[in-house]
Image (cartoon, rainbow, N blue to C red):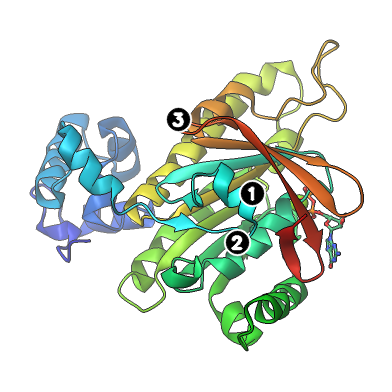
Amino acid sequence: MSEIFLEELPGVGPATAEKLKEAGFNTIEAVAVASPAELANTAEIGESTASKIINAARQSADIGGFETGEMVLERRKLVGKLLTGCVEFDEMMGGGIESQAITEMYGEFGSGKTQIAHQLAVNVQLPKEQGGLGGSVIMIDTENTFRPERIKQMVEGLSERKGVDYDYEEFLKNIHVARAYNSNHQILLVDSASELANELKDTDKPVRLLIVDSLTAHFRAEYVGRGTLADRQQKLNKHLHGIQRFGDLYNAVVIVTNQVMSKPDAFFGDPTKPIGGHIVGHTSTFRLYLRKSKGDKRIIRLVDSPNLPDGEAIISVTTGGLVDQ
Ligand code: GTP
Ligand code: MG
């Protein structure tokens, strides 16, 4: 990412730069992918000024406009694949969970969403040769379900399986967790996540995984009743775009979790439908539907992907982490 300061863009004085930073636009790249209206609102400037700033940012960040297929291929070469450590699951994902994309996991309580999130928070820290991305993790925890004890158990399990003596304390150091107390706070935390990722980008543990667990719980609890649905979807949509932008800018894997409607909201509601409906569905690149099976077994179905066939994988959730069934 470029080392140029926001103040160096034409039309951006120190006061505007400060406002942009407060709103989470702390890099040229973040400004470059913003919409004029978004920037105008946050920095209290006119839309035409905002457009000029965005264009200048696009030029200096070298993004925006059309890309040739060759360029897309070049960018796609940077896409990292994070292994879950379960053979069927990794194969179903085409060799791991991709960075620069949102992967949504939805399923009922106890289906394993949070467990998989914990396991990925461990695996992503491993070097590439071992299936990780050599990076650190940011976790936005909305339900207070992050458990350092589980990380310890999973690191111990991994040590046993790989025959390497990993130190769980080193792993815990690279997991940055923030509780989100309500949906607005949750949205703001994506900005804080960008700040942190920016700080860590040139270290030996750049952020390579963003987890939002649960994406939808606060929204569901706060926006009740039919009249609020449009508002909820609009906010969720904006939130998801902020999350997607994070994944693109930092070449990070993005995992969001989502419950299904166990008590159908509408009379004819499908009890296996994820919350957030088509907004979440259209913005996430990969959708995984998790179901409980016998004992510790969990069935994971890939239901939506731009380049992979739909499929099913079975894993076991054990004390030492996720393993093949
Ligand atoms: P909600 O957040 O409630 O929607 O569910 P979830 O999909 O996030 O479920 P989660 O990933 O928390 O799965 C919980 C299940 O994982 C438990 O019911 C156990 O079956 C399993 N599990 C959790 N911790 C352990 C553990 O330490 N050992 C073993 N063997 N299993 C565990
Ligand atoms: Mg959970």
Task: Identify the residue under disc 3.
Answer: 306
CA–CA distance between discs 1 and 3?
19 Å
SS under mark 3: loop
User: How many residues crowd mark 1 within 10 Å: few (<14), some (14–19), many (20+)?
Assistant: some
Q: Amino acid at mark 2?
A: Leu
The N terminus lies in quadrant: bottom left
Residue 49 can be seen in this image: yes
Beta carbon at label 2 within 8 Å of ligand 1: no
Dot 3 or dot 2, earlier in sequence: 2
Q: Position of residue 183 (x, y in %)?
A: 63, 44
**Tag 2's secondary structure?**
helix
Q: Position of residue 295 (x, y in %)?
A: 92, 52
For label 1, the SS is helix
Amino acid, disc 1: Glu
Earlier sequence position, callout 1 versus callout 2: 1
Q: Quadrant of the rendered structure where residue 325 is?
A: bottom right
Residue positioned 21% across, 47% down in the render: 74
Residue that badge 2 annotates: 120
Q: Quadrant of residue 276?
A: top right
Q: Which residue, given by chain and number where applicable, does mark 1 sit on?
A: 88
